[in-house]
Each structure stands twice: as C-alpha cells, then as structure tokens.
Amino acid sequence: MRSALIGSVVVFTGYSLVLAVARGGGPAQVLAGALANTIPVVLLGLAARSVILRHLTGRSVVVATLGHVALAVAYSMLSYWFLLVLLGVINGVSATEFDVRPFDRRAMAWQTLQNVTTYGLIAALTLLQARSSITSVETARPRPAGDGQSRYFIRSGEDFRPMDTASIVSIAGADDYAEVRTMDGRHLVRMTLGEFETSLDPERFARVHRSHIVNLERIDRAESAGNGRLLLHMETGERIQTSRAGAKRVRDRVI
C-alpha cells in the first residue's frame, strides 16, 4: 500500500510537470489533467499487478508471453477509455452531462504507445519484486520415495523457518519453480515438481496431474469429472482436476 501511494504521487507529479510545460494553462486545469491521467495508471496498474502475481508469475515462457500480450492490450484499451471518460467529466457541464471525444489519430497513437510502455514498466517492476521475494527451499537433496521429509526449511528474506509438510495442501509446478499452497498462503519456490515428488511421503502425497501434487489428507471431497478423471475439492477451496492416471492413484489410496 505504501509503495502504491508513493508511486501515485510520483506519477501525478510527473504528469503535472509535463502538462504544465507542454500545454500550459492555469494550475487548476493542469492538476485536473494530471489527475485524469494518473487515476487510470494507478487503478489499472494495481489490477494488472494482481493478475501478474496470481496468474503469470512462475509460468512457462509461452504462457507468460501470451498472458502479458493479452494483458498489455487490455490495459492499453481500458486506460484509453478511462482517460477519455475522465477528461469528458472534467470538461463537461456536470458528472452526468459530458461528451466523450476521442483523440485525433496522432494523439491516439502516442497514447497507445504510452499505455503499452507503462504496462511494460508495471510488469517489469512486478516481476522483479516477485523474484526478489521468491522463497528458496533449503534441502540437501531430494530423498528417495518412501523416505519422505516431514519438514522443509524455507528462506524468507534473510531468515530461515521450518515448514511442516502436513500444512501443504497442494503443489503446482511450472518449469524450474513450484508454487506450494498451504492453509496460510502460497510460496513460490525454486524446486521442480519432480524433486518434490521424490522427497515427499508417497503415502500422504500423490501426483494427480503432470502439474499438480496434492496432500491426500487435505482433500475435502472428490467428484467425477468424466473420462475417468476426478475433480478434487481441497480444504482451501481450490479445485484441481486430475488426469486419468492421477484419478486412479487417488482411488487406490483413498476410496
């Protein structure tokens, strides 16, 4: 929240200076224009940051690239629309009586470039922050199946703290990273799903999909998903669909 507030002040100040130099006008007009430009950047920037952290961090290169392209297009279009509406309100008779006038071709091209560049900056800062806060799992070597670890030590900043495997609900894999989901939250770790599979207790954990491992003791209920698959409802509310082989593993051990 503090960083968002500081960023808002920086963006507002920057727009105020640019508009004062480029367009002139009275202080009220400059500040109103700066506010109209700042609001879309802040609100849509926070929304984009949330989407990146939740859905794009740790994904494969192809998925992340496609996701960023789609998000950049959406961010650019919504920012442009939002800006036109705010400028219309500022220059209109009232908040309910105003005209929305599009920019001319050159101004629209410049605004689009500005929006795409702004999204790129937001994405870069978000990914840098995510990487700097990635939790490192400290284990000597994955133990062989059947000798599952009951505890991991994870690095949080400069500190190490234990994480009991019983608290793990599921693990989702993406390339060289895995997202460990516990009852308390999520941790992005530098460890492959295969390494987790060989180090966890096979009596408690099962790989139900090529991208998911679940704690069998944290399954709230399972229902048929057709074609021999199951839809697992975890205690956190998360829903995970198994492969046919994964469904067989669940049925063999649980049902």
Image (tube, helix red, strand yellow):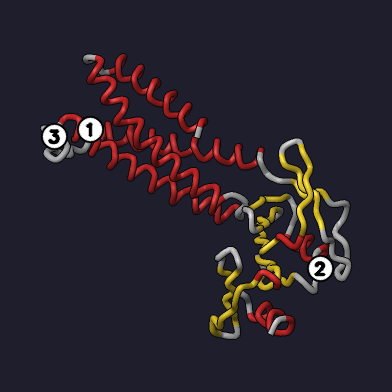
The residues bearing labels 2 and 3 have C-alpha atoms spaced at a distance of 65 Å
- Helix, strand or loop under label 1: helix
Q: Of 246 and 152, which appears nearest the observer?
A: 152
**Residue shown at 68%/44% (left/top)?**
134
Residue pointed to by mark 2: 201
The x and y percentages for residue 7 are 47, 28
Residue under label 3: 94
The mark lying in front, picked from 1 and 2, is 2
Residue type at mark 3 is Ser
Image spot of residue 128 (x, y percent):
61, 37
Q: Quadrant of residue 100?
A: top left
The amino acid type found where label 1 is placed reads: Leu
In which image quadrant can residue 38 be found? top left
Q: Earlier in the sequence, mark 1 or mark 2?
A: 1
22, above or below 191, in the image: above
Q: Which residue is mark 1?
A: 87
Instruction: Pick whichever of labels 2 and 3 is earlier in the sequence.
Output: 3
Q: How many marks?
A: 3
Spatial distance from mark 1 to mark 2, Cα to Cα?
A: 60 Å
Measure how far apart labels 1 and 3 are at the Cα level: 12 Å
Task: Name the one closer to the observer, 223 or 236.
Answer: 236
Residue 137 is left or right of residue 250, and the answer is right
Q: Are marks 1 and 3 in contact (CB under 8 Å)?
A: no
Sequence-wise, the earlier of marks 1 and 3 is: 1
In front of the other: label 1 or label 3? 3
Q: Amino acid at mark 2?
A: Asp
Q: Dots 2 and 3: beta carbons under 8 Å?
A: no
